[in-house]
Amino acid sequence: MAISAKLVKELREKTGAGMMDCKKALEACDGDLEKSFDWLREKGIAKAAKKADRIAAEGLTAFVVDGDAAAIVEVNSETDFVAKNAEFQELVQLVAKTVVAANPADLEAALNLDVDGKTLETVIAEKSGKIGEKLSFRRFVVITKNADEVFGAYSHMGGKMSALVKVAQSSDEKARDVAMHVAASAPQYIDRSAIPADVLDRELAVLKAQALEENANSARPKPENIVEKMVQGRLNKNLKEMCLVDQEFIKDPDQTVAQYLGNGKVLDMVRFQVGEGMQKREENFAEEVAAQMKG
């Protein structure tokens, strides 16, 4: 029978499962909502969907390099306990490999990628049902390169943080070192040309206001031209901290990243840290174990 959008919507609202999973369930059960709900439960999908209001702010990042393409992903779990689970780690690698092979346009397209006859969204939901925690594929970036460019990738703290860079006119070793630096130092931009004009303007305005305030309260106020030089000096210092190529290289602070690379040029960089910008649940280890036992 033809499955209406209204039926799919109703089942989705009841279970919280993905649209495609609801459609498949209804097709398999001839449009019967209750049987479709049971079908989703049997597949572990409805069970996972009931956890949709939980916070999944733990998990792992991972990278995969496949020829001239590389991907970096973040997949979240509710607890660090599950993040250390071998099945979850295998899932994260599967997500990364699936994404790098297809280079989808966005997260929605990525979740609809085929994995042995199932969507990636379904694979994640089924694993969520099996493990007993909400798992979510949060984000990804795929980078492609030319033959004369190299990737550098680095993962830290067992996958809690990963970085991926693309560098021209450099070696694999240097590119990896730069990725390590990105993971550790968290630069916001590759170089000053990448800083948006509004960010520069805001930074300059803040520093100027600070300098004028300091000068007004000083026992010996400085001339305006000296204050301007102070502002420019502080701005340059802040921009060096923001920009990868201007930062002191983590393995040799006597030189900048740009000096370490020589003729090499960083063309792209991505850094993922698990849960950054997400709400996290405060929970001690005893409570975490108790929550696991309750299922």
Image (spheres, rainbow, N blue to C red):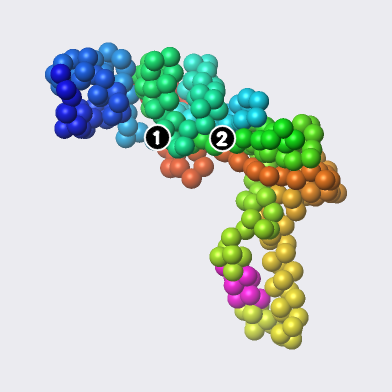
For this rendering, which residue is in front, 280 or 88? 88
Q: Which residues are magenta?
A: 202-211
Q: Residue 71, image x and y in percent?
A: 58, 31
Quadrant where the N terminus is found in the figure: top left
Q: Is residue 48 left or right of residue 275?
A: left
Residue positioned 51% across, 23% down in the render:
98
Task: Give the alpha-carbon distance from disc 1 to disc 2, as whole Å.
Answer: 15 Å
Mark 1 or mark 2, which has the lower sequence index? Answer: 1
Q: Amino acid at mark 2?
A: Val
Q: Is residue 3 left or right of residue 98?
A: left
Q: Amino acid at mark 1?
A: Glu
Q: Which residue position holds label 1?
A: 108
Residue positioned 67% across, 58% down in the render:
193
Residue positioned 23% across, 30% down in the render:
12
Residue 159 on the magenta segment:
no
Badge 1 marks a residue whose secondary structure is helix
Tell me the crowding category of disc 2: few under 14, some 14 to 19, or many 20 or more residues within 10 angstroms, Cα based: many
